[in-house]
Amino acid sequence: MKPHDGLYIDGAWRPAAGQDLIEVVNPADEQVIGHVPAGTALDVDSAVRAARAALPIWAATPPAERSARLIALRDVLVARREEIAETVTAELGAPLAFSQTVHAGVPIAVAGSYAELAATHGFEERVGNSTVHHEPVGVVGAITPWNYPLHQIVAKVAPALAAGCTVVLKPAENTPLTAQLFAEAVHEAGLPAGVFNLVTGLGQVAGQALAEHPDVDLVSFTGSTAVGRHIGAVAGGAVKRVALELGGKSANVILPSADLAKAVGVGVANVMSNSGQTCSAWTRMLVHTSQYDEAVELAAAAAAKYGDRIGPVVSARQLDRVRGYIERGVAEGARLVAGGAQPPREKGYFVSPTVFADVTPQMTIAQEEIFGPVLTVLRYEDEEDALRIANGTVYGLAGAVWAGDEAEAVAFARRMDTGQVDINGGRFNPLAPFGGYKQSGVGRELGAHGLAEYLQTKSLQF
Ligand code: NAP
Ligand code: MG
C-alpha cells in the first residue's frame, strides 16, 4: 500500500499539526519503505474531539446496525487480505506465508466474531426488579504494539465498535502502514466519521498524550510491562478505566507421560514463529530430569531445522536487545545448543533460532521477556518442582501442559498462575478470553469477555 501523509481524523485524511515524520524500515533488508506523520498532542486532541462528537450517535445506533458495519469491515479485510499480508511482511519482516495465515487471517476471524457478538450479545438483562443496561464506556484510547500489528488493533477496535464506543488509535511507530491500511478499511466499510480515528506517532509523545487526555474514558494498551505500569498509573490518577495486555514468560510443561518428541517439536515451533515476538510464547520449556538430555537434543535439532526460514526481528533496537540477552545467558552459565548472538546474515535484523540448555530458574534469560527466537530449557525433579518453576516469574500470560492423559494435564494446568493454557497442543481459539495473571496485565481481550471491557452497566429499578 501507498503510505498516507496525513492522519485519519473525523472520516478523512488530514495534515498533522507538526512537520515531524516517522521513517518506516523493512527489517529484512533495512530499506526505508515510507514515512508517516509523527502526530503530537494537538493531533491527539483533534482526534479525541472527533471521537467524542461521534459518540452519542454511534452509542445509540442499534447493535444490529453496528454489527452490519463490522461485517462490512470484515469483508473489506477479506478483500484486501493479500495487501495486508504484504504490508505486514514489509514493515514487520514476517515471512509472507505467515503473514497471510496469521497476520491477516486472525484479525479477519476476530472482526467476524465481533460482528456476530454485536448482533447477539444481551445488552439488556433483568435482575429481580431491575433492568440492567450494558452501555458503551465512551471514548477509547487504544495503544498497540508492532508484534501482531493488525491483530492487536482489531482485538481492541472491533469490540469497542461492537460495544458502541468510539476510538482513537495510536499504533506502534514500527508498524504504522498496517494501521493506515486498517483506517482505509474502516473508511471503505462506511463507518460514520469520527467513530474511528488514527494518530500515528511516537509513544512518548502521541501515546502519552492519548493516555493523559481528560476526555478519554478508557485506555486500552498492549505492550511492555514497563510502559503498561506507567499507563496504569496515569489512568489511575484520572480514575479512568484501563486495560493492560503486557509481557509474558510462559512455561511449556512437559510431564513424563507426554509424547516428548511432539511436545518439544510444537514447543520449538511456538517460540520460533514470528521470530519469537509473541507475548504468549512458551519461552521456558520444563522437562523432567529423566528426559532432559533427550529433550535438549530434540529441541536443538528442531531449532537448527528452522535455520533461515524465520524472519528478522522488527528493528535494530530489538536486534541489540535480543543479542544482549543471548550474551547474558552465556555469561550466566547457560549452555548454547543452537544459534547464538552472531548475526546469521549481513543485512537485515536476523537472529538465528537459539536454544539454551542448563538454564536455572533464576537466570535472567529464564525471568525476563526476550522477545526474540530464544528458547530456554529447564530441568525439574518432580511435579511440585515443575509447578514452582512454572509459577516462578512475575508474569502469567499463557502456557502449555503435555501429558499422556488429558485429565493429568488439566489438573496441572489448573494450578498454574496464568490466563491461558494449551492442553496437549490445543488450538488457538479467537473466542476464548486472552489476558494475564500477575504482571501480565489487567483485563481480557477476545470474545464476549473482550466485549465486556468496553461496556459499563446502568441499573434501572422498578
Ligand atoms: P512498548 O514500548 O511498550 O510499546 C507499545 C506501545 O506503547 C507502542 O505503540 C508505543 O509507541 C507506545 N508507548 C511507548 N511509550 C509510551 C508512553 N510513555 N505512553 C504511551 N504510549 C507509549 O513496546 P515496544 O517498544 O513495542 O517493545 C518493547 C518490548 O515490549 C518488547 O521487547 C517486548 O518485550 C514487549 N512487547 C510486548 C508485547 C505484548 O503483546 N505483550 C508486544 C510488543 C512488545 P512506540 O511504538 O512509539 O514505542
Ligand atoms: Mg517502544
Image: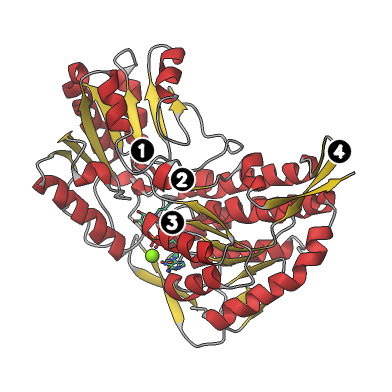
Which element type, helix, strand or loop, lies under badge 2? helix
Mark with earlier residue (4, 2): 2
| Residue 25 to residue 412: above or below | below
What kind of residue is marked 4? Asn
Which residue is labeled 3 in the image?
Answer: 223
Q: Are marks 4 and 1 in contact (CB under 8 Å)?
A: no
Mark with earlier residue (3, 4): 4
Near mark 4 (Cα within 10 A), the count class, few <14, some 14-19 or many ≥20, is few
Ligand 1 lies under 8 Å from the Cβ of mark 1: no
Which residue is labeled 1 in the image?
Answer: 250
- Residue 6 seen in render: no
Res. 129 mark = 4
| Quadrant position of residue 242 | bottom right
What kind of residue is marked 3? Gly
Name the front one of labels 2 and 3: 3
| Residue 297 to residue 33: above or below | above
The image position of residue 53, as x and y in percent, is 75, 73
| Residue 364 to residue 269: above or below | below
Near mark 3 (Cα within 10 A), the count class, few <14, some 14-19 or many ≥20, is many
Q: State how many labels appear.
A: 4
Q: Nearer the viewer, residue 364 or 183?
A: 364
What kind of residue is marked 1? Ser
| Quadrant position of residue 169 | bottom right
Q: CA distance from mark 4 to mark 2?
A: 52 Å
Which element type, helix, strand or loop, lies under badge 3? loop
